[in-house]
Amino acid sequence: MPGDIDPLVLAWCAFALLCGGLIKGALGVGTPLLTVPLMALVVPPQVAVALMAIPVVVANVWQASSARNPRAVVARFWPTFCCLLVGTWAGVKILAVIDDRMLLLLVGIAVIAFAILQGSSYKLHLPTRAEKAAGAGFGLASGLIGGISSMFGPMLIIYLVSIRNFTKNEFVASISFLYIGAVVPWLLTLIYYGILRGDLLLASAAATLPVSIGLFIGQRLRHRISERHFDRLVLAVLLASGGTMIWRSFG
């Protein structure tokens, strides 16, 4: 980003980043979904995406490490984490030979259908004995879809909200841990290919400040959100993710 950036553009980006941190702190998800479109109103979309690189890594590491029992989270979801890494690698590899628009359309429809189903009285729940096996499958699917489209969240959200008696704090800690398996390789890839360097790298580092402020406020707000309302807000993010995938399939 140029050094003589318009102060109004800078203020708007800071506001967008603050909002992204706020929703991340409150729900554990939804940061790029909100922040990137807001910033893309005043800066090129590629710049908006790159600016989120360091903040999303910091936010997810922060939330995962501040969990009440991070070792229990790792022990419970390591198969999902490992399969997410494998799926991401495979997704990037097949990006050049797949019709990503059709994939986004089909997955987007499935995501919206699941969100509607979970919001009804016909909720789907994973049996405890199937949790790790299902996690491996969803991790692989999340990595594949994310490697192709950069949208890692929907499959992980579907998996976690299907776990019976999963509290809001467990959800935030778990999805933040899993996101690390996606965003850290993504950050390293941006740096390796020279997409994130120079002024843009410094700007992404500086963007961590407003995101962190929003994250802190969002975490305080989470304590005021009931489990029922938290579930509905997460499903709303899932609906928005599915809608975004469908929109991108026609882009």
Image (cartoon, rainbow, N blue to C red):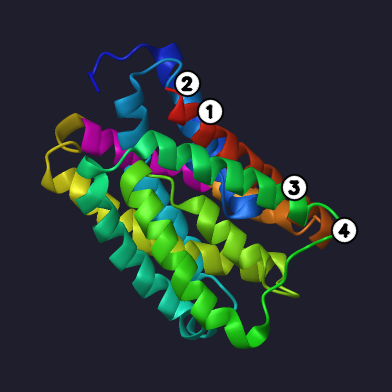
- The residue labelled by disc 4 is 121
Q: Earlier in the sequence, mark 4 or mark 3?
A: 3
Q: Are marks 4 and 1 in contact (CB under 8 Å)?
A: no
Residue holding disc 3: 116
Q: Say which element carries label 1.
A: helix
Badge 2 marks a residue whose secondary structure is: helix
Mark 3 and mark 1: span between their CA atoms? 31 Å
Kind of residue at badge 3:
Ile
Residue in view at x 30 percent, y 27 percent: 46
Q: Position of residue 239 (x, y in %)?
A: 65, 41
Given the current orientation, which residue lies at the most extreme right position?
A: 121
The residue wearing badge 1 is 15
The quarter of the picture where residue 109 lies is top right
Along the line of sight, which residue is nearer the eye, 114 or 176? 114
Residue 78 visible at all: yes
Q: Does the residue at mark 3 contact the one at mark 1 (Cβ under 8 Å)?
A: no
Residue identifier under label 2: 11
Which residue is at the front of the view, 45 or 102? 102
Q: Residues within 10 Å of mark 4 (few under 14, many from 20)?
A: few
Disc 2 crowd rating (10 Å Cα; few below 14, some 14-19, many 20+) is few
Disc 2 marks a residue whose amino acid type is: Ala
Quadrant location of the N terminus?
A: top left
Image-based side of 142 in relation to 27, left or right: left
Q: Mark 2 or mark 3, which is nearer to you?
A: 3
Measure the C-alpha gap from mark 4 to mark 3: 10 Å
Q: Which residues are magenta?
A: 200-212
* Mark found first going from the N terminus, 3 or 1: 1
Q: Earlier in the sequence, mark 4 or mark 1?
A: 1
Taking 64 as reference, is 70 above or below it? Answer: below
**What residue is shown at x 31% (from left), y 38% (from top)?**
204
As shown in the figure, which amino acid type bears the numbered disc 1? Phe
Task: Specify which label sits upstream in the sequence, 4 or 2.
Answer: 2
